[in-house]
Amino acid sequence: MGRGKIEIKKIENATNRQVTYSKRRNGLFKKAQELTVLCDAKVSLIMFSSTGKFHEFLSPNISTKGVFDLYQKATGIDLWNSHYERMDENYRRLKEINKKLRREIRQRMGGDLNELNIKELQALEAKMDSSLLAIRERKPPLKRLLTMFLGTMSSKLKQTNTRRR
């Protein structure tokens, strides 16, 4: 007696879904291994479960890079070049941001000011003023602590002087 057909849709019960995933994954890996042995096929199988776990099968006669190289050759798509171009563009963008930030730091320290025009100097002055304001806003708690400390020290000195008289 054969099995009945099942409806192909997402299994709602998480436990049943995990069991089905595990059994079918093992079945796929078994078929991939059989293809490799029987037909000398180069097989690579990569799977990620819904929980993010990674599973792979790779024929013993090829590496992962070899599979990607064969894929590129068959499809005519250069995977590595497009990835390299994205990385290179991101590198150039970050390098430019770094250059601007270093220049801004030098200017705030008083260097590289000769190449600025009047508007840029005024903008730098405004930034410095806002930074100074932020520092002054943090200063009062320190000033109060210092005043309390000096007040305590002053009273102790007065007591010591009174005792000595």
Image (tube, rainbow, N blue to C red):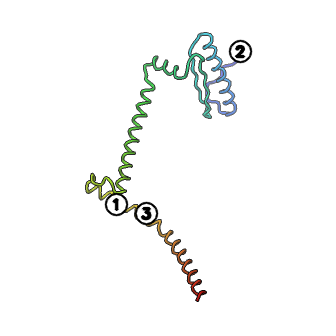
In percent of the image, x 69 and y 19: which residue is there?
4
The crowd level at tag 1 (other Cα within 10 Å; few <14, some 14-19, many 20+) is few
* Residue at image point 69% right, 33% down: 15
Give the image location of residue 126, x and y in percent: 34, 60
Viewer-closest of 44 and 162: 162
Within 10 Å of the Cα at label 2, are there few (<14), some (14-19), or many (20+) other Cα atoms? Answer: few
Assign a secondary structure to mark 1: helix
Q: Residue 76 location, x and y as percent? A: 43, 19
Closer mark to the observer between disc 3 and disc 2: 3
Secondary structure under tag 2 reads loop
Q: Quadrant of residue 36?
A: top right
Helix, strand or loop at mark 3: helix
Q: CA distance from mark 3 to mark 2?
A: 78 Å
Amino acid type shown at disc 3: Ala
Amino acid at dot 2: Gly
Looking at the rendered image, the quarter that the C terminus falls into is bottom right
Q: Residue at x 62, y 12 (%)?
A: 37
Per the rendering, the mark at residue 126 is: 1
Marks 2 and 1: which is nearer the front?
1
The residue carrying pointer 3 sits among few (fewer than 14), some (14 to 19) or many (20 or more) residues within 10 Å by Cα, namely: few
Whichever of labels 3 and 2 marks the residue nearer the N terminus, that label is: 2
Read off the residue under disc 2: 2
Query: Residue 21 — which label?
Result: none
Q: Is residue 141 left or right of residue 21?
A: left
Q: Residue furthest front?
A: 164
Query: In the image, residue 106 lies at what x, y percent?
Result: 36, 53
- Residue 27 left/right relative to 65: right
N-term-proximal mark, 3 vs 1: 1
Tell me the residue at 44%/64% (across/down).
135
Give the percent coordinates (x, y) of residue 153.
Answer: 55, 77
